[in-house]
DNA sequence: TCCCAGGCTCTCT
DNA sequence: AGAGAGCATGGG
């Protein structure tokens, strides 16, 4: 990837495989909002605006340090998608999904935000998930000049179910608080999970109330860098049965999370 | 109105 | 170990 650092923006020149809409609005992150031609949002406590211009990506509102320290990794720009997409395309069905959804990248989000976001996602629909998360940030996140940061575990751990009534998350409120408490107490150290095996990290996460296999996989994939994690929601389960004989194709296992994202996008929009 | 949502927990076999 | 009800809330 080639980067140009201007005074008012950072340019990613002709990036391979980075479609803003498909990446930011495909159900892996919930806080990016389209305003005009730009996607605006706060990630890692930093406000940014992104826009595609003639095949380049412009990023406004952040410093070079923000980019080097956070966004370069957030957008997974160091990963060789050329190799990975080729590899998972050894399966014909996945090849179709890749052709259809080209440009999706896995976002490396903050672990705690991923954890809470996907706890909220259970038995829920995407528009409502976004609403709940926005209310969570507005009520309990730190206000910056361009919006609210995602609340800290410390802040959420001090709340009661009644305090959380304002976000209207329903039965998930007790799960949010349980997660925040375990993280704050140190019982679960999210950063340390990166060093564990997939199985052990998964087991640790599922100690949290309201975290089962699917939510754990989402946290591992979107928050902790386990690119092999393959979240199985109702859509993916249907697709696995229908197209893949009930199991993940061998060629897609190493990069299961990326394959999953392309399959998810494909079956939800095209019904391939 | 009714059905269902990027599931999980709890209970009962 | 596997099946099924119930869960809070609201979008379509």
Image (tube, coloured by chain):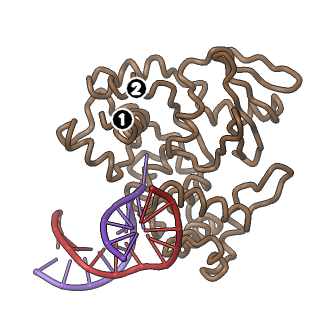
Chain colours: A brown, B purple, C red
Foreground pick, A150 / A184: A150
> In terms of sequence position, does the residue under pointer 2 or pointer 1 come before the other?
2
Q: Is residue A153 left or right of residue A48?
A: left
Foreground pick, A166 / A225: A166
Up the image or down, A96 lies above or below A238; here it is above
Q: Residue at x 66, y 45 (%)?
A: A33
Label 1 sits on a secondary structure element that is loop
Q: Is residue A172 left or right of residue A231?
A: right
Q: Say which residue label 2 marks.
A: A100
Q: Residue at x 38, y 18 (%)?
A: A86
Please tell me how many numbered marks the rendered image carries: 2
Q: Residue at x 38, y 33 (%)?
A: A259
Q: Chain of mark 2?
A: A
| Residue A55 seen | yes
| Image mark for residue A270 | 1
The C terminus of chain A - image quarter? top left
Mark 2 touching mark 1, by CB under 8 A?
yes
Up the image or down, A214 lies above or below A178; here it is above
Name the spot of residue A54 as percent of width and height, x first. Answer: 67, 16
The N terminus of chain A - image quarter? top right
Foreground pick, A227 / C9: C9
Mark 2 vs mark 1: in front: 1
Up the image or down, A225 lies above or below C12; here it is above
Mark 2–mark 1 distance (CA, rounded to whole Å): 8 Å
Name the spot of residue A183 as percent of width and height, x first. Answer: 61, 64
Name the spot of residue A115 as percent of width and height, x first. Answer: 55, 57
| Image mark for residue A162 | none
């Amino acid at each position: 990837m080639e980067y140009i650092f201007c005074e008012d923006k950072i340019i990613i020149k002709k990036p391979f495989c980075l479609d803003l809409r498909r990446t930011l609005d495909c159900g892996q992150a919930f806080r990016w909002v389209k305003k005009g031609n730009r996607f605006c949002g706060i990630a890692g406590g930093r406000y940014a605006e992104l826009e595609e211009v003639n095949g380049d990506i412009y990023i406004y509102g952040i410093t070079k340090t923000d980019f080097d320290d956070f966004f370069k990794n957030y957008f997974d720009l160091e990963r060789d998608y050329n190799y990975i997409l080729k590899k998972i395309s050894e399966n014909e069905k996945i090849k179709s999904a890749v052709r259809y959804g080209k440009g999706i990248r896995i976002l490396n989000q903050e672990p705690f935000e991923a954890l809470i976001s996907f706890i909220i996602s259970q038995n829920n629909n995407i528009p409502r998930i976004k609403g709940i998360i926005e209310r969570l940030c507005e009520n309990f996140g730190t206000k910056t000049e361009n919006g609210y940061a995602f609340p800290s575990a410390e802040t959420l751990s001090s709340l009661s179910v009644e305090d959380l009534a304002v976000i209207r998350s329903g039965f998930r409120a007790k799960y949010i608080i349980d997660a925040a408490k375990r993280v704050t107490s140190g019982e679960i150290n999210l950063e340390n999970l990166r060093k564990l095996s997939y199985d052990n990290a998964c087991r640790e996460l599922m100690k949290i109330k309201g975290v089962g296999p699917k939510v754990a996989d989402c946290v591992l994939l979107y928050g902790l860098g386990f690119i092999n994690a393959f979240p199985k929601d109702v859509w993916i389960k249907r697709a696995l049965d229908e197209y893949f004989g009930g199991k993940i194709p061998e060629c897609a296992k190493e990069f299961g999370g990326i394959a999953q994202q392309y399959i998810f996008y494909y079956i939800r929009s095209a019904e391939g």
